[in-house]
Amino acid sequence: MTNANDAPPVAVTGAAGYIGSHACKLLLDAGRSVLAIDHLGRGTKKAIGALETHSRGRFAFAEADIAD
């Protein structure tokens, strides 16, 4: 992942949900790299796919539960 400003990536939990996916999009629009984390219990892979398409190489996804 590359950042426009060499800042470390931002980790977003719940990234496949409504609020998380919109937060990821705003961060990507601002030039930040995003590490998206979601267990896909309620979120969708469709949201992750849209972010990957939008990211220009600044997006990574980890299917994980932060409670583990």
Image: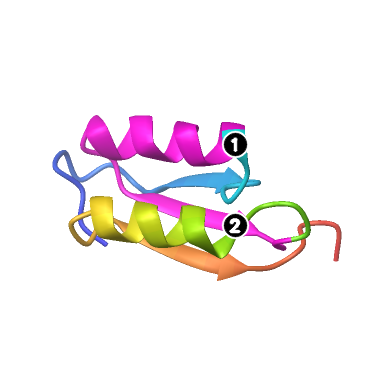
Q: Who's the residue at 20% across and 48% down the image? A: 3
**Direction from residue 7 to residue 20 in the image, left or right:** right
Q: Who's the residue at 60% across and 57% down the image? A: 37
Could you tell me the amino acid type at mark 2? Ile
Q: Which residue is mark 1?
A: 18
Q: Earlier in the sequence, mark 2 or mark 1?
A: 1
Above or below for 13 versus 53: above
Q: Who's the residue at 63% across and 44% down the image? A: 17
Q: Secondary structure at mark 1?
A: helix
Could you tell me the amino acid type at mark 1? Tyr
Judged from this view, the residue extending furthest toward the right is 67
Q: Position of residue 54 (x, y in %)?
A: 25, 50
- CB of mark 2 within 8 Å of CB of mark 1? no
Q: Is residue 31 magenta?
A: yes
**Direction from residue 18 to residue 55 in the image, left or right:** left
Judge depth for marks 2 and 1 and give the one in front: 1
Quarter assignment of residue 20: top right
Q: Position of residue 13 (x, y in %)?
A: 63, 47
Q: Position of residue 47 (x, y in %)?
A: 49, 53
Distance between the alpha carbons at the discs numbered 2 and 1:
13 Å
Q: Secondary structure at mark 2?
A: strand
Q: Who's the residue at 47% across and 33% down the image? A: 22
Q: Which residues are magenta?
A: 19-40
Q: Which mark is residue 37?
A: 2
Pointer 2: residues within 10 angstroms few (<14), some, or many (20+)? many
Q: Position of residue 14 (x, y in %)?
A: 65, 46
Judged from this view, the residue extending furthest toward the left is 4
Above or below for 68 versus 26: below
Pointer 1: residues within 10 angstroms few (<14), some, or many (20+)? few
Q: Which mark is residue 39?
A: none
Quarter placement of the C terminus: bottom right
**Direction from residue 62 to residue 50 in the image, left or right:** left
